[in-house]
Image (spheres, rainbow, N blue to C red):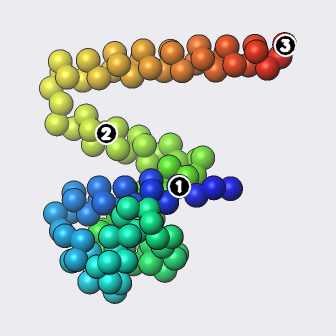
Amino acid sequence: MIVDYKAIGKRIKIARIRKGISQEETAELSSISSRHMSNIETGRTKPSLPTLIAIANALDTSVDYFLCDNVVKSGYVFKEEANKLFSDCDDYEMRIIMNIILATKESLRQEIDIRKRLLEN
């Protein structure tokens, strides 16, 4: 299994920015160096489980959020993110976003069907 450390780092950075604190503050709250924090956010360093837990605690989030791009059964994290995205949308924006989502879903499923048929032949 390949772990996408860049995706983990990106989610850590997003959580940090949402909380409104700097890398340095996050590093201090997590008891790691600022350089180590920077390397984690860019995916250059593989954080240990205790470090991920410390960062999650510092950012008032869950480790699940950091790992959801790597775990198959993470739908609930993405649903929560979608709810947050919709929370500040007006009716028009929601309708446009839903149209985009529906078109993307339809295209994705068509592509999956095509691939299945190709593999069967």
Q: Are discs 1 and 3 less than 8 Å apart at CB?
A: no
Which residue is at the front of the view, 118 or 64?
A: 118
**Disc with the residue nearer the chain's start (1 vs 3):** 1
- Relative placement, left or right, of 97 versus 40 is left
Q: Secondary structure at mark 1?
A: loop
Count neighbours of disc 3 (C-alpha within 10 A) and say few if under 14, some if 14 to 19, many if 20 or more: few
Q: Which residue is mark 3?
A: 121
Residue 29 position, x and y percent, is 28, 82
Quote the CA–CA distance across marks 1 and 3. 33 Å
Q: Secondary structure at mark 3?
A: loop
- Relative placement, left or right, of 100 versus 63 is left
Q: Amino acid at mark 3?
A: Asn
Q: Amino acid at mark 1?
A: Asp
Nearest to the eye among marks 3 and 2: give it: 3
Residue under the image location 57 percent in, 52 percent down: 71
The vertical placement of 39 against 54, above or below, is above
Residue 40 position, x and y percent, is 40, 68
Residue under the image location 38 percent in, 61 percent down: 42
Q: Amino acid at mark 2?
A: Asn
Q: Secondary structure at mark 2?
A: helix
Count neighbours of disc 2 (C-alpha within 10 A) and say few if under 14, some if 14 to 19, many if 20 or more: few
Q: Are discs 2 and 1 less than 8 Å apart at CB?
A: no
**Disc with the residue nearer the chain's start (2 vs 1):** 1
Quote the CA–CA distance across marks 2 and 1. 24 Å
Mark drawn on residue 4: 1
Count neighbours of disc 1 (C-alpha within 10 A) and say few if under 14, some if 14 to 19, many if 20 or more: few
Mark drawn on residue 83: 2
Residue 57 visible in the displayed image: no
The vertical placement of 103 against 89, above or below, is above
Quote the CA–CA distance across marks 3 and 2. 41 Å
